[in-house]
Image: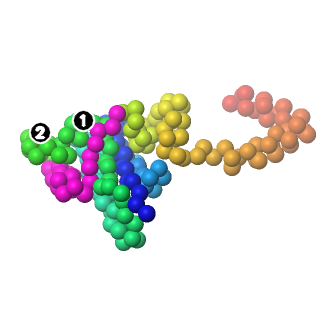
């Protein structure tokens, strides 16, 4: 059975306030299921958001190719070449633009790697609106509402069902012993 394969790639340019290194992330989906993801700090400081995003794109492309090889070995095919989604227009255009950009010479290996697989038709790179960038959840702290929205879109459960029985048991214990319940409330307020 063939499935659609999509990888979201993102970077938080100079997001670390201590050393201004970027965080590179990706989430790979087979159909609607996340099957691989990563969030890691870049080893070098980059000078532009496009460079950070392009390095993240190359990292995501590498993981996607590895997964494709694994699927082929397992006898699983995809319905179309995988899509890499990036929310940076500059990085998206660099992936298929054959013109060498003199300002990007320091990332030529990543440029040639991604361009080569795009030109062969192995992968397709597309722009995605920042609001639809699911990998954003792995790059930086977000508001509670944005985190919840992306968590639901990615398909990660919140874990409430695991805790429900335990919370219920604890509340019954506190109701049976009002003195310890009052003491626990006082300790929480004193923190």
Residue 173: give its label: none
Residue interval drawn in magenta:
108-129
Element type where label 1 sits in the image? helix
Left or right: 30 in relation to 87? right
Residue 89 marker = 1
Q: Nearer the viewer, residue 22 or 90?
A: 90
Q: Where is 70 relative to 50, above or below?
A: below
Measured as percent of width and height from the top left, residue 155 is found at: 52, 46
Q: Is residue 116 left or right of residue 73?
A: left
Q: What SS does tag 2 mark?
A: helix
- Residue at the spot x=39%, y=53% of the render? 4
Quick check: can you spot residue 20?
no
Q: Give the residue at the far right of this rendering.
A: 176
Q: How many marks?
A: 2
What's the residue at 41%, 57% (across, down)?
Answer: 3
N-terminal of the pair, mark 1 or mark 2, is 1
Residue shown at 31% from the left, 41% from the top: 86
Image quarter hosting the N terminus: bottom left
Residue 10 visible in the snapshot: yes
Residue matched to label 2:
103
Q: Is residue 188 above or below residue 115?
A: above
Callout in the foreground (1, 2)? 1
Query: Could you tell me residue 181's position as x and y percent?
Result: 84, 35
Residue found 21% across the figure and 52% down from its top: 118
Q: CA distance from mark 1 to mark 2?
A: 16 Å
């Amino acid at each position: 059975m063939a499935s659609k394969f999509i990888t979201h790639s993102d970077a938080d340019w100079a997001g670390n306030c201590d050393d201004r290194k970027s965080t590179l992330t990706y989430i790979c989906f087979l159909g609607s299921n996340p099957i691989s993801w990563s969030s890691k700090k870049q080893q070098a400081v980059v000078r532009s958001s496009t460079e950070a995003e392009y390095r993240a794109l190359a990292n995501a492309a590498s993981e996607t190719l590895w997964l494709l090889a694994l699927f082929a070995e397992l006898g699983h095919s995809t319905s179309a070449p995988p899509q890499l989604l990036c929310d940076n227009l500059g990085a998206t255009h660099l992936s298929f633009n054959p013109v060498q950009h003199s300002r990007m010479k320091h990332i030529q290996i990543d440029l040639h790697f991604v361009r080569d697989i795009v030109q062969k038709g192995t992968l397709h790179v597309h722009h995605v609106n920042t609001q639809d960038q699911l990998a954003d959840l792995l790059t930086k702290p977000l508001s509670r509402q944005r985190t919840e929205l992306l968590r639901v879109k990615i398909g990660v459960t919140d874990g409430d069902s695991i805790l429900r029985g335990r919370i219920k048991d604890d509340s019954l214990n506190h109701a049976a012993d009002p003195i310890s319940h009052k003491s626990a409330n006082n300790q929480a307020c004193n923190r």
